[in-house]
């Protein structure tokens, strides 16, 4: 059998291949278009887009390093008015907030009624009164007798029937009986006082005066009652001499200096109150935090810079004290919200040509808003604020503004 030649095979293939491609059905074109559109959509969704971020510009300005903690207001000089004697305290008419002057009578104390006696003690006391009365009567009789003797001796001595020594003896006896009468009378008063006689009770009131001018801070005893000597009645102070006591951690207190600027916040108004550090106490106390951690706390005393212009703060009000421990007026600064950790160092994402570039920086002192930059950034560069975990080095970004 003879095989066809090459030319014959080419001719045979040309005869079997149609000269025009077959026409596709309309449904096939629809499916092809849908597939192409879906492919384009997937490519568009997978294509990396620029992230929208907030941008800040590196500038120069003040940078502060501050510490803040809770504090309490207090009057610098608080006077506690106490009862000078034991007795019946009359009702105090003053109210907290009332103004008082130095030496003004703020309370009155009357002697208290004697204590009640049981039957046996009362009988002994009454017997003591009777015995004292009898002794007084005997002493008075002796006194009258001594008066008569002295008168007789004086008459005889005037007629030269008695010596001068006899007259002197009569005078001495008269003085002795007079002293005995006074002693017996004092014994009678003492016996009556022990028996609780009303005549032995003195009704002289004891006034209680204010030691200084100011206002009544609080009443420790207002109603009528029996007050013991030394028991506190009220506290008086001058609200114009208010100061703030804040308990800072010891590691924060060592960074402060007397005279440093401070601000009082959360006192009830929106504007911070300017203050100064007056004193840092040298003694730290151990306090237990809300998490159960032992902390060493130091009292820092703050004084208002303009107390006459400040709000009406009282004694024991809660405030927040913010103390400036370091400050630079013209420093190259970066917002604190732009800093991220790069290992053990700090870095920022710098916006350049539409991409975020992770740039290491060296920062100095600062606070919650800004930190000073010593190396890594220049004036006018733009950095990303609040960079998230999804932002990587070289990612495309664009400003939200």
Image (spheres, rainbow, N blue to C red):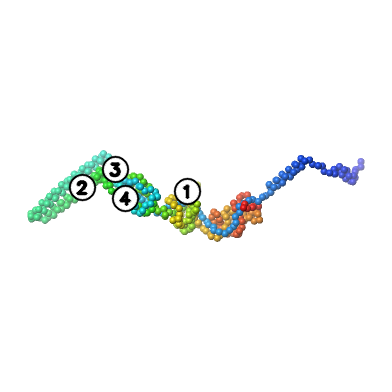
Q: Which residue is mark 3?
A: 115
Mark 1 vs mark 3, foreground winner is 3
Sequence order check, earlier mark of 1 and 2 = 2
What is the crowding at mark 3: few (fewer than 14 residues within 10 Å), some, or many (at least 20)?
few
Task: Give the percent coordinates (x, y) of residue 301.
Answer: 45, 55
Disc nearest the viewer among 1 and 4: 4
Tell me the residue that label 1 is attached to: 288
Q: Rounded to the nearest whole Å, what is the CA distance between mark 4 and mark 3?
A: 23 Å
Name the residue tied to disc 2.
185
Disc on the earlier residue, 4 or 3:
3
Can residue 315 be seen in this snapshot? yes
Q: For the point 29% across and 48% down, which residue is it?
A: 205
Q: Nearer the viewer, mark 1 or mark 2?
A: 2
Q: Quadrant of residue 35?
A: top right
Ranked by sequence position, the earlier of labels 2 and 3 is 3
The residue indicated by pointer 4 is: 207
Residues at badges 1 and 4 in contact (C-beta under 8 Å)? no
Rendered image: mark on residue 27: none
Spot occupied by residue 139 in the image (x, y as percentages of width and height): 17, 47
How far apart in space, not on screen, are marks 2 and 4 (Cα)? Answer: 31 Å
**Number of marks:** 4
Nearest the camera: 363 or 1?
Answer: 363
């Amino acid at each position: 059998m003879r095989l066809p030649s090459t030319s014959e095979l080419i001719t045979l293939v040309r005869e079997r291949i149609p000269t025009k491609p077959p026409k596709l059905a309309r449904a096939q074109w629809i499916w092809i278009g849908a597939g192409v559109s879906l492919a384009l959509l997937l490519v568009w969704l997978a294509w990396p887009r620029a992230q929208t971020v907030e941008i800040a510009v590196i500038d120069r300005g003040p940078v502060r390093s501050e510490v803040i903690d809770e504090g309490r207001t207090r009057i610098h000089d608080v006077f506690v008015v106490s009862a000078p004697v034991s007795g019946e305290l009359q009702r105090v008419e003053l109210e907290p907030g009332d103004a008082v002057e130095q030496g003004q009578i703020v309370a009155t104390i009357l002697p208290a009624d004697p204590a009640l006696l049981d039957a046996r003690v009362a009988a002994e006391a009454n017997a003591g009164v009777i015995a004292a009365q009898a002794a007084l009567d005997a002493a008075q009789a002796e006194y009258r007798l001594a008066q008569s003797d002295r008168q007789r001796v004086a008459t005889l001595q005037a007629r030269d029937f008695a010596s001068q020594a006899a007259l002197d003896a009569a005078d001495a006896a008269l003085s002795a009986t007079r002293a005995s009468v006074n002693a017996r009378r004092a014994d009678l008063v003492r016996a009556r006082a022990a028996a609780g006689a009303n005549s032995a009770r003195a009704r002289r009131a004891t006034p209680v005066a204010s030691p200084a001018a100011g206002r009544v801070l609080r009443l420790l005893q207002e109603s009528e009652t029996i007050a013991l000597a030394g028991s506190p009645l009220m506290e008086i102070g001058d609200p114009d001499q208010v100061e703030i006591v804040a308990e800072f951690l010891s590691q924060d207190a060592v960074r402060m200096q007397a005279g440093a600027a401070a601000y009082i916040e959360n006192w009830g108004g929106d504007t911070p109150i300017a203050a100064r550090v007056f004193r840092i106490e040298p003694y730290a106390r151990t306090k237990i935090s809300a998490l159960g951690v032992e902390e060493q706390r130091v009292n820092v005393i703050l004084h208002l810079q303009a107390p006459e212009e400040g709000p009406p703060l009282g004694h024991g009000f809660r405030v927040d004290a913010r103390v400036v421990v370091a400050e630079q007026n013209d420093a190259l600064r970066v917002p604190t919200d732009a800093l991220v950790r790069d290992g053990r160092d700090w870095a920022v994402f710098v916006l350049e040509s539409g991409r975020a570039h992770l740039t290491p920086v060296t920062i100095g002192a600062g606070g919650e808003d800004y930190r000073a930059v010593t190396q890594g950034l220049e004036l006018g560069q733009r950095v990303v604020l609040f960079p998230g975990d999804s932002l990587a080095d070289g990612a495309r970004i664009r400003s939200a503004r």
